[in-house]
Image (spheres, helix red, strand yellow):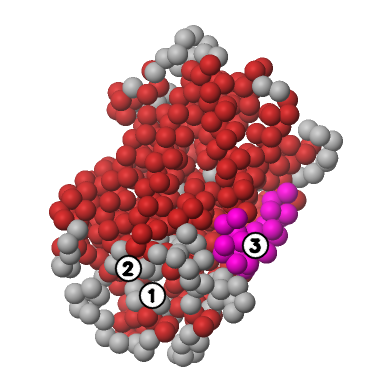
Amino acid sequence: MSQSHPDTVSAVLARGRLGIPAVIFFVVAAAAPLTVVAGGATTGYAVTGVVGIPVSYLVVAAVLALFSVGYVAMSRRIVNAGAFYAFVTRGLGRPAGVATAMIAVVAYNAMQIGLYGGFGAVLSQYLNDRGWDTTWWLCALAAWAAVAVLGVLRIDLNGKVLAFMLIGEFVVALIYDVVMVSHPADGIKFDTLAPSHILATGIGAALVTAITGFVGFEGTVVFSEETKDPKRTVPRATYIAVAITGLLYGASAWAMSVATGPDKIVEAASTDGTDLIFNLVSPHLGSSFITVGRVLFITSLFAALLSFHHTVARYLFALGRERVLPAMLGRTSLRTGAPKAGSIVQSVVALGVLVGYAIADADPIVHLFFWITVTGGLGVLVLMTVTSASVIAFFARTANSDGPWRTKIAPVLATLALGAILTVTIQQFDTLLGVESTSPLRWAFPAAYAVAALVGLMWAGVLRSSRPAVYRAIGLGAESATAPIRTPDPVRQPA
């Protein structure tokens, strides 16, 4: 591999193209609110059998808000598209940073590629019901082609596409909530919001289901290099994204339990699946409005596909720019400023997986959408836990004026909370997958991240011994491409 840097222009993302609204659209679109409301919440009820899904969303939102305190404090000092990778590098050292990067690449690819299964299955069912005979993989490939094209275009153009879809999702979800609460099965009850559900059996599966619904909010830092004012945009966008998604998820999951009755929500979710919310509101709304909701459910999945594609491309760009991965990944399009090489690589990987699933005739909902996206959510939970710990380490040795709440108290509490959720999640992963406790799958999926971390640690060791200049530049971000390689500040760049 060449040791030369990519040229300055091609190694820099397009700056100043995203404001607070655009960043919010990207990260909330990744969370796919209508997909979570219509698909995630109902699946959570059905698979886990836990009626406390609404309170799970609220608890997770509170934990993520706590995590965000230290996260955004660190973002004011580190502007890097590598996000978790860069933060862990600065806090826990380069080997841990490279290990984190490998986990991130696996986790976000899992989230992105898994969504193709859901998109393909839902769209093909929608078309088949209307006389168009098609298959899930054909619909998935159509989405893949659209994402592949949009992935190499200007980031602000993509933001406009996501904004259009996201506004429609929120409007429909809120109207559906009002309709369901206005027509309770047995009076308006708040049983599913009771805090006691947090101690119920299977709560680990419920919590990771909830966390999967928020995956994407942390992407505010991923887009930081392309924002107009990172120190202002990233913190505000992060808090707003957590707040609006948490409230929407909790309210919508609760509204469904009101419409069915708290004691019947699990049975109804198991029977109707992702059709539950549409079946609950259809007697009270016109058919055209139900159709709009179903179409927006499909576009919600597409919006999430597009947003996660951008996240993966930017992680690959950050690693290529620092030559942790091949330098070609650190190049951007001279015309659009998009990380073209990283985008193309992500598209190629996704295409390979889709073709493999189609040939194997695997179930797109269970084996691709559910299993793979849940595994992606587990990976992001690992990333947040490690990142939270890195915030503590970073501020412990860095002079700052943010105060103990942002640099010590909140990060410590967030690390403990995320660590507890991660532990319970791994213990109950069989419940989440819907497999027997003796099934090797319950350990196979989590083990993938252990393997990725080990590969990262080993590769960091190789770089340290064989390419010390590259090793010293790990975590520098844009400086690694636009400035000569230098020995990092020992305070901010731990060995």
For label 2, the residue is 78
How far apart in space, not on screen, are marks 1 and 3 (Cα)? 25 Å
Tell me residue 465's x, y (percent): 31, 84
Would you say residue 264 is visible in this rendering? no
How far apart in space, not on screen, are marks 1 and 2 (Cα)? 9 Å
Q: Are marks 1 and 2 in contact (CB under 8 Å)?
A: yes
Tell me residue 55's x, y (percent): 37, 29
Judged from the image, the secondary structure of the residue bearing numbered disc 1 is loop
For label 1, the residue is 477
Q: Which mark is residue 150?
A: 3
Residue 408, by quadrant, is bottom left
* Most frequent secondary structure within the magenta stretch: helix
What residue appears at the point 45 percent right and 29 percent down from the top-left corner?
251
Would you say residue 186 is visible in this rendering? yes
Residue type at mark 3: give it.
Answer: Leu
How far apart in space, not on screen, are marks 2 and 3 (Cα)? 28 Å
What residue appears at the point 30 percent right and 23 percent down from the top-left corner?
196
Q: Residues within 10 Å of mark 3 (few under 14, many from 20)?
A: some
Q: Nearest the camera: 356 or 384?
A: 384
62 is within the stretch colored magenta: no
Residue type at mark 2: give it.
Answer: Ile
Q: Earlier in the sequence, mark 1 or mark 3?
A: 3
What residue appears at the point 25 percent right and 60 percent down from the top-left corner?
390
Q: Nearest the camera: 484 or 16?
A: 16
Tell me residue 405's x, y (percent): 18, 50
Q: Are marks 1 and 3 in contact (CB under 8 Å)?
A: no
Judged from the image, the secondary structure of the residue bearing numbered disc 2 is loop
Q: Earlier in the sequence, mark 1 or mark 2?
A: 2
Residue type at mark 1: give it.
Answer: Gly
**Magenta stretch?**
139-160
